Amino acid sequence: MTDLCEGGMEDLWSIAVVLLQVWFSVMIGFIMIPAMFGLSLGVTSVYIQILVKILEWATLRIERGHRERSTLPVPAPLPFGLIQREGGSMEQEMGELRRYRTQSISRGEFALSDSFYFYIKGLESIVDDQVTQRFSSEELVSWNLLTRTNHNFHYISLRLTIIWGLGVIIRYCVLFPLRITLAIIGLTWLVIGTTLVGFLPNNRLKNWLSELVHLMCYRICARGLSATIQYHNKENKPQKGGICVANHTSPIDIVILANDGCYAMVGQSHGGLMGVIQRSMVRSCPHVWFERSEMRDRNAVTSRLRAHVAAKTNLPILIFPEGTCINNTSVMMFKKGSFEIGGTIYPVAIKYDPRFGDAFWNSAKYNMVNYLLRMMTSWAIVVNVWYLPPMTRREGEDAAQFANRVKSAIAHQGGLLDMAWDGSLKRAKVKEEFKEQQQKMYSSMVMGKKAPANA
């Protein structure tokens, strides 16, 4: 009996070894090697096409279920939140409130109806302000089979429930282990490869090998997210000695952009695993890492970035001027520091397809580990990247105006809302200067003067 048990265990171990060999052979041969050389076998494209068909069928089935069950409310989509705002200026909206008066606002006299404008704006902000909703997940018109939180979608049909269950098995038992394995391999190779390259003397060979290692590692990590990335207008790709600025939705924005070219990263120095990765990267490539004390010194940061840009052989700096992640619907105010450095700005617009997964990182709700687990158990990451024509600061244009011009171009290209609010309001109170701007604008109208240009 003992011999039979031992023989059975040996057989199980043999089967497990064979399965692992097959697993790694398929992963290396069909995913890693093509990814390292920027090639695709088309498997991901077919997978995305199948997903689109399934999601379309699920949407139609849900709509039919709503019609069959009159007790189920059919919510109307609210793409711009709970409140539909007209989007006019203060003067236009106050003029609308004064429409029953013979006196126009251009005469510069106070009207009691003006107070209703501020009442309305205050109530709108209490119910659904424009800033807070940019830090919550983007609303979907239909269910993407990733959650069961909406009771309206429960048990609409047996087939829909079965497909959802199969999706859970595929995402957690097949895709998740594969993605974890690829992510570990990609990060391990990044640390080892950049460390080895760092021992070489500074020359063209070292720069070439460094870029090759970075590209390979980021491409492996992108495959680990089942990322399907469409790059547009590649003739406008950021060049060495320039500054690449992009809207910010997720920490994986770096992986998405670096999958098509190498960048010098800018950020705060960390400890632990992230610190190991940062130290290995900086050995092979001039990334710009700051200590916490340096980050508080604006002049020191600007000086180091200006010195990096001055060397036209250095990789373009990648900066996210919003300073925080926004929910893939809008672009918020750009910090002007990136636009005071000088040099050429290369704007990039990034827009994720929310049907396949929510790429937005709500740092107030999820830590980094939880966020990455959500990413690796989603269907896929589908994203469009637009390279915009390079932009330079115009004569007489200050850094803030230049930043707003670049922000508007990115928002227009990506189909995103152009917001004037500072993303730091996610964790801070409104600055007094914002309140003063509104007061100055109204005061100028009452006094019959032109509102200040910076208001």
Image (spheres, grey):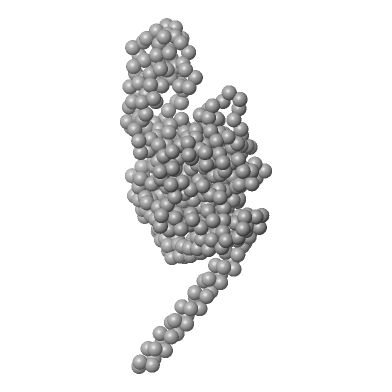
Q: Is residue 69 left or right of residue 331?
A: left
Q: Quadrant of the N terminus?
A: bottom left
Residue 238 at x, y = what percent? 62, 43
In the picture, residue 67 is in which quadrant? Answer: top left
Q: Is residue 253 left or right of residue 436?
A: right
Q: Residue at x 46, y 37 (%)?
A: 298
Residue 113 at x, y = what percent? 35, 14
Q: Nearer the viewer, residue 23 or 167?
A: 23
Residue 79 visible from this viewpoint: no
Residue 166 at x, y = what percent? 44, 62
Q: Nearer the viewer, residue 171 or 75?
A: 171
Q: Nearer the viewer, residue 405 or 171?
A: 405
Q: Is residue 412 left or right of residue 135?
A: right
Q: Residue at x 34, y 18 (%)?
A: 116
Residue 234 visible from this viewpoint: yes
Q: Residue at x 47, y 17 (%)?
A: 452
Furthest-front residue in this view: 201
Q: Is residue 316 above or below residue 158?
A: above
